[in-house]
Amino acid sequence: MGVCLWRLEIGEQGIGLYWESYEKSGLNPLTGETAVALRRRVHVELELPLREAYEAFVRGLVNGS
C-alpha cells in the first residue's frame, strides 16, 4: 500500500493529510460471527514538525513506522 501525503500551506507550518489504517469490528450477516476488518481513513495533522523533525516525520510515514 502506498503512502499519500499532502501538505497544505496554511499559516507558517501548514497541515498534513495522510491515510491511516485502523481496525473495525462488525458482524458477518451470513454466519452471525464477529469479524474484524482493516479500514483506512484520512488523518489530519494540524501541527506539523519543523526542519529535521519534519523530515523524520515523513520518513516514518513512508517506512510505515
Image: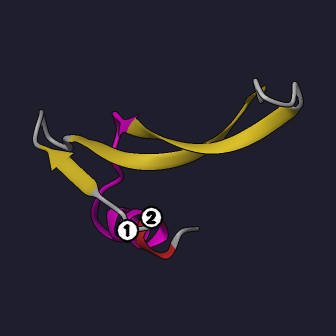
Residue 26 falls inside the magenta stretch: no
Q: Disc 2 vs disc 1: which is toward the camera?
A: 1
Q: Nearer the viewer, residue 21 or 61?
A: 21
For the residues marked 2 and 1, what is the alpha-carbon distance in whole angstroms?
10 Å
Image point (77%, 29%), residue name:
28
Q: Is residue 24 above or below residue 22?
A: above
Identify the residue position indicated by label 2 in the image.
61
Residue occupying image coordinates x 35% and y 48%: 18
**Splitting the image into 4 quarters, where does residue 46 fall?**
top left
* Numbered range of the magenta stretch: 44-60
Q: Which quadrant of the rendered structure holds the N terminus?
A: bottom left
Task: Name the N-terminal-most of marks 2 and 1.
Answer: 1
Quarter location, residue 61: bottom left
How many neighbours does mark 2 have within 10 angstroms: few (below 14), some (14-19), or many (20 or more)?
some
Q: Pick whichever, 48 or 38, lies toward us.
A: 38
Say which element carries label 1: loop
Name the amino acid type tagged 2.
Leu
In the displayed structure image, the side of residue 51 where residue 41 appears, left or right? right
Residue 59 image offset from top left, x and y in percent: 41, 73
Could you tell me residue 55's position as x and y percent?
34, 70
Q: Residue at x 14, y 41 (%)?
A: 12
Q: Position of residue 19 (x, y in %)?
A: 41, 48
Between residues 49 and 61, which one lies in front from this camera angle? 61
Q: Which mark is residue 2?
A: 1
Q: Image height check: is 35 above or below 60?
A: above
Q: How is the image coloured?
A: secondary structure
Q: Is residue 65 left or right of residue 54?
A: right
Q: Is residue 41 left or right of residue 3?
A: right
